[in-house]
Amino acid sequence: MDRLPIDDVMPAILDRVRTTKRLVLEAPPGAGKTTRVPIALLDAGLAGEREIVVLEPRRIAARAAARRVASERGERLGDTVGFQVRFEDVSGPRTRLRYVTEGILARRMVSDPTLARVGAVLLDEFHERHLAGDVALARCLRLQATTRPDLVVGAMSATLDAKALVDRMGAASLVRSEGRAFPVEIEHAAVRDERPLEVQVAAAVSRAVAAGKGDVLVFLPGAAEIRRASDALRGLASSMGLLVLPLHGELPPDDQDRALRRADRRRVVLSTNVAETSVTVEGVTAVIDSGLARIASVDAWSGLPELRVEKIARDSAAQRAGRAGRTAPGRCLRLFTKPDHDARPEHGIPEIRRLDLAETVLELRAAGEGDPAAFPWFEAPPTSALAAAGELLTRLGAIDASGEITAVGRSMLAFPLPPRLARLVVAAAELGVLDEGVAAAALLGERDLLRISGFDGRGRSTPRGAIHDTASSDLLPRLDALDEAVRVRFDPDRLRGLGLDLNSARAVARAREQIDSVARRTLRPAPSPPSADEALAVAVLLAFPDRVAARRKSGERELVLSGGGTAVLAEESVVRDAEFLVAIAADERPRGGPLVRIASAVDPDQLMDRLPERVREEVVTKWVADGERVEALKRLVYDGIPLEERRVSSEGVPAVTDRLFAEAQRVGARVFEEAGAVDRLLARSAFVASLDAGHARPLTEIDVDEALRTICLGRSSFAQLRDASLIGALEARLDGSARAALARLAPERVVLHAGWSPRVEYAAGRPPWIEAMLQDFFGLAKGPAVGGGRVAVVLHLLGPNRRPMQVTSDLEGFWERHYPTVRKELSRRYPRHDWPDDPRTATPSHKAPRRRRG
């Protein structure tokens, strides 16, 4: 067995573990920490008779490390050394060293909170700050500090903030291994390259192969990019005798091992970031770095995990470059510019700050950890993320209102699936459609079978974007596509003819088998129902209860979403007739709302029967503009989406009053009275208040609004408001003495002679005034007064042509000084009128106009 750099510090590692039971190990890639440290602890007896569990961030790393250690010991994999990843367990009763992915330990701590059969837990590549690793470290440290002081806890990484980790782990001992590294020449792209990534890779590989010896390791975001790069390299590989090998988690184990082993000819290994730290590719002297990786994230719409292509941080770029200098001086060609590199953050964002926490919260609740907010997180998550996780789990029925895990929640934990998909499987079993639910969960958990091209559900391929037949769910053609792929045994040519992607089809089929295996062991399916499609729709609803939507208009694709907002149903969707649906998967768009790709019809009765706690009855109002009236509607509403509605009587409905008042305010209160009436009343009250503040307060616009609201009570239309008396309601805002003062001191009219009482006009900043014919004042020695006789009314005296002749507040003086002259002129111009010598005693000769309202 070759000696590795980690062997030089192994005595220190064992000594520190014996002393403190806690270890922080910093060692560069290829130093041997993943394979040598765990087995050394086991051989030294530091785990006692218990197992050593090593947490790996990726399945490929767990498999590769276990195989390497078993091979070095000359044992069969699954004996002393084994591994356990999602849906795959290669271990046995004699296994003492187990490499696992992080979620495996989380589920184990639910069933065995004290880790009774575990003597040591080592977290590999901790610098990647996976959510499950953060939680596992926190739980193991607390366990060690309470009921398991004998438990060994260690964190290993190539690059990490060692001081922060040591501080967090308390008495942990830090050990560093310098490793063995040769200088690496780093070359950046001179300018940003706009060519397709696979074209850039082919050009860079050609340069790297020509520049030196050794294998070439190319870092690409994912399997799709690897396939395209492999195709682009076919000509170069043929001409130069190169062996092009993919390396990613979707490959069968034998293909993964092939990429990790040396070969009899020069290799070009096209890898995801799995080769960055988790596994070692032997013989590499040149690295080509795309600067990209698929980073674990969460779909903002469905809440399901997804991988997004993002730029890597600077520490990841350094890790990748270091892979070229393990055995000899090497070279790294970065397909991005130096300014681009320097502008990137030093470290990536920890998963705790960017992933959905529902699965983690469910596991903590199941393990009896209590309130997740009080959990000793390595780094506390956002409060909003914890609240959202609790809300989702409650809606899924996984926890109750007090936060305690339910029977449904415990059933969900049997599946290494996101909570929504686990709930889908559990609900499908309860409804008698387990097979369909398992297949649907597999489809939703992997890449979409029909995103590349169409499939009509009957074995016929269709062009991308083709119009499919109407169906109750977009899952149905996908289920048919999956069955067809299995039927043709994943024949590449047949699948290509069907428009299906080979790797996606295999991944979905494999996931279906794995989920089904767990379901058959843990669930008791109900008998098959009369309608499997309807039962599956209910299971989907229970898994996505917060994604209910309704068409804005029948036959249209625009959707109104529960909880607010809008979306658009994809044109390719087969859910063409349903008024209500569950929007399962959607793509975010910069404008126009999300585009819903996968939907499933839902019936209002299903919502009311299955989720009655989310359905409420409400009375709403509708404004009928043509009739200027308010209608009252009683609705059944699911999370803001009306399921059904009917007209009811508006009598005594407060919402009707509120709506009528709002619409009346919109047009203005004054339209419901004679023009000017409201303003005259306000002016009269202001006049009275100006005479003596003790008489009455002036009416204001606030009073107008309140009076308007008063007359809206018990009414539902503008016509009824016009028949009501806004003026009466406004006067009623004054008390009895104030109303009496208003009538006494600011009368609406003054009497000039029998049958004629002109209206007194009041206006702010002006004395009260009236307008009348000169003859109307015959027989009056003095002009009228208001304000209890204190304020003379200004008189606008009109001639027979109804034009002002004189404006005065002193009628007695006018008769005395001006009338004689005026009389002569009027007699000449209007000889048929009577112009008496003494107007003070004369009888009015002008016929009073007919009195009008107001």
Image (cartoon, helix red, strand yellow):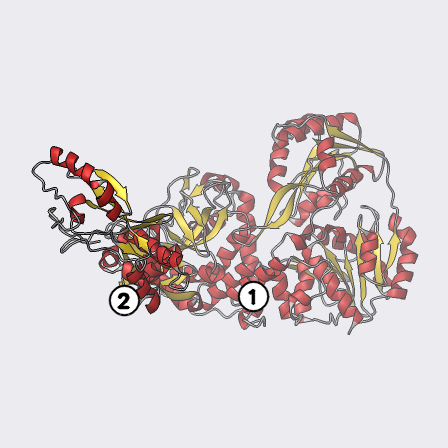
Identify the residue at image location x=63%, y=62%: 360
Judged left or right of residue 517, residue 602 is left
The kind of residue tagged 1 is Met
Residue 353's place in the image compared with 344, above or below, is: below
Residue for badge 1: 412
- Residue 359 visible? The answer is yes
Q: Which mark is residue 743?
A: none
Classify residue 145 as left or right of residue 663: right
Q: Is 243 situated above or below 488?
A: above
Front residue of this view, candidates 782 and 98:
782
The residue positioned 48% from the left and 56% from the top of the image is 440
Provide residue 599's location: percent of width, then percent of height.
Answer: 43, 52
Query: Tag 1's secondary structure?
Result: helix
Query: Toward the viewer: 549 or 835?
Result: 835
- Amino acid type, callout 2: Glu
Q: Which-is-in-front pick, marks 2 and 1? A: 2
Is 334 positioned to the left or the right of 742 in the image? right
Q: Which mark is residue 651?
A: 2
Q: Can residue 528 be seen in this view?
A: no
**Could you give the CA–CA distance between mark 2 and mark 1, rounded to whole angstroms?**
50 Å
Q: Are the two marked residues, 2 and 1, in contact with CB atoms closer than 8 angstroms?
A: no
- Image spot of residue 180 (x, y percent): 87, 43
Q: In which quarter of the image is residue 18?
A: bottom right
First reached walking from the N terminus: tag 2 or tag 1:
1
Provide residue 336's location: percent of width, then percent of height.
70, 32
SS of the residue at dot 2? Answer: loop
Question: In x, y percent, where is residue 185?
Answer: 81, 31
Give the quarter of the image for residue 16: bottom right
